[in-house]
Image (cartoon, helix red, strand yellow):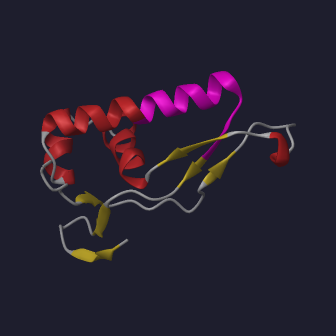
Amino acid sequence: MPRPRRCRRVSFRPDITYFKPAGVRLSGLNECILTIDELEAIRLKDLLGIDQTEAAKQMNISQPTFHRLLLEARKKIADAVVNGKAIRIEGGYFRMVRRGGRRYGRF
């Protein structure tokens, strides 16, 4: 029996949740779904430049889990860019927190 998943802490929820290639009809596009927790991993590591160990602490997960999350997110983004797919940002197992660590609630 696998271990129960830890709820990941996320402090950023995007206003824009869909990206698609310009000049391609939406009806003819395949999609990649990027979860909110994967987006948070990308934001912490690639945008803010935070060390993986510190970013994992902020998300309340282990460093190896953070690394796997980051690899999966990067793979999905690369697939979308190289193969001309749309990216939908939704879902995941997380809870929103404020910067001080207080919860907003579960999503």
Residue at x-position 59% and y-position 56% = 17
Q: Where in the figure is residue 51, as x and y percent of width and height?
A: 19, 33
Q: Quadrant of residue 101?
A: bottom left
User: Taking 96 as reference, is 57 left or right?
Assistant: left
Residue at x-position 44% and y-position 30% = 74
Check the image and name the residue furthest to the front: 1
Q: Quadrant of residue 93?
A: bottom left
- Residue 88 visible? The answer is yes
Residue at x-position 12% and y-position 42% = 62
Screen quadrant of the C terminus: bottom left
Q: Where in the figure is residue 95, as x and y percent of width and height?
A: 29, 67
How many numbered marks have been drawn onto this rendered protein structure? 0
Q: Is residue 48 above or below residue 79?
A: below
Main SS type for the magenta part?
Answer: helix
* Magenta highlight range: 73-87
Query: In terms of depth relative to the viewer, which is nearer, 15 or 90?
Result: 90
Residue at x-position 19% and y-position 54% = 5
Query: In terms of depth relative to the viewer, which is nearer, 104 or 50?
Result: 104
Q: Quadrant of residue 60?
A: bottom left
User: Taking 10 as reference, is 52 left or right?
Assistant: left
Q: Where in the figure is residue 24, as x and y percent of width and height?
A: 85, 38
Q: Is residue 77 above or below residue 41?
A: above
